[in-house]
Amino acid sequence: MLRVALPNKGRLAEQTVILFERAGLKAESRVERALVANLGSEFQAIFVRAQDIPEFVSDGAADLGVTGADLVAESRQEVRELLDLQFGRCRLALAVRDESPVKAVEELEPGTRVATSFPRITEEYFRSLGMELRIAPVSGAAEIAPHLGVADVIVDLVSTGSTLRVNGLREIVTLMDSTARLIANAKAVDDPLKGPVIGELVVALESVIRAAAKRYLMANVPRDRLAEVKEIIPGLSGPTIVEIQNGNGWVAAHAVVDANRIYQTITRLKAIGAEGILVTPIERLTP
Ligand code: AMP
């Protein structure tokens, strides 16, 4: 059994379990909210704090883990990053009070106090700029620090930006972009028994992630417009063209299409006379 450390709460927890389930690995435990669960027959999940996962993976307590790229970077632990899981997207950003005249990071005075729960990334960032600031480490809720007078600016995770707005703060610069990552212990990846099992997991998760960005589209199209159909829905290797019984001048065209372009794609298909357009989600996509 390979051990996989998964976030037990917070923004990444739910989507992580959904992703594994879509890949065919449903977390099953004997009791609700258990800290350990079976994940298929080859993996065991342990549910721990996202912050602790880089360390658990690095020291071998877990072979694999899912956590944010921001937490991996802040931990300074040696782990192998295997996959960008594409969810939990956020940025680590520096923000000042709304009324501050500061518009760019270079305008911050030496000695400015920065509240952050990412002290290492923040320190390195300012060092790379040759700036000397004072870091005030906090374990959360950095956004309150400027109002309490314990810091002048903050470095914190931002997703929609509404937390900053509500707290009267204004974003100045992004230090790093982050998403959830699949990370692994280097020894486990290189192990002749564990390595191939990890490789299969990566392929399975990748196929789910790839599929999430795609849709399967089917439409009845006039046979004499096939050249345009191929241009509108090229698919992975050209659309599949299927005969319709008693279809006369019509055929069915099937293709995998980009989910984020589905609106334009349907509009263009309708413009060349397509009918019976059907769009369905794809569970897995392995090229
Ligand atoms: P928002 O108001 O959407 O900008 O979210 C900001 C708040 O959510 C901050 O308190 C962040 O610490 C937290 N946050 C946003 N995105 C993430 C993420 N991907 N992982 C963990 N915390 C996050």
Image (cartoon, rainbow, N blue to C red):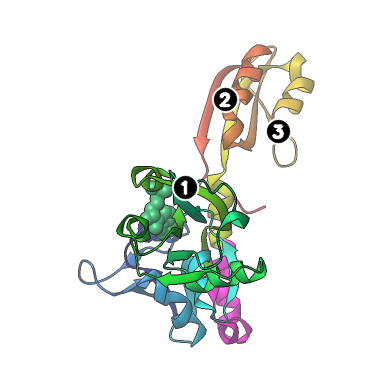
Camera-side residue of 21 and 151: 151
Q: CA distance from mark 1 to mark 2?
A: 43 Å
Check disc 3 and give the amino acid type.
Pro
Residue under label 3, please give it. 239
Q: Position of residue 52 (x, y in %)?
A: 40, 77
Q: Is residue 147 left or right of residue 121?
A: left
> Label 2 neighbourhood size at 10 Å, few (<14), some (14-19), many (20+)?
few
Query: Quadrant of residue 141 in the image?
Result: bottom left
Sequence-first tag of 2 and 3 = 3
Q: Position of residue 92 (x, y in %)?
A: 51, 58
Of helix, strand and loop, which one carries label 1?
A: loop
Nearest to viewer (mark 2 / mark 3): 2
Q: Kindly tell me whether residue 15 is visible in this rendering.
A: no
Q: Kindly tell me whether residue 70 is visible in this rendering.
A: yes
Q: Which mark is residue 259?
A: none
Check disc 2 and give the amino acid type.
Tyr
Magenta part of the protein: which range?
183-203
Sequence-first tag of 1 and 2 = 1
Residue under label 1, please give it. 100
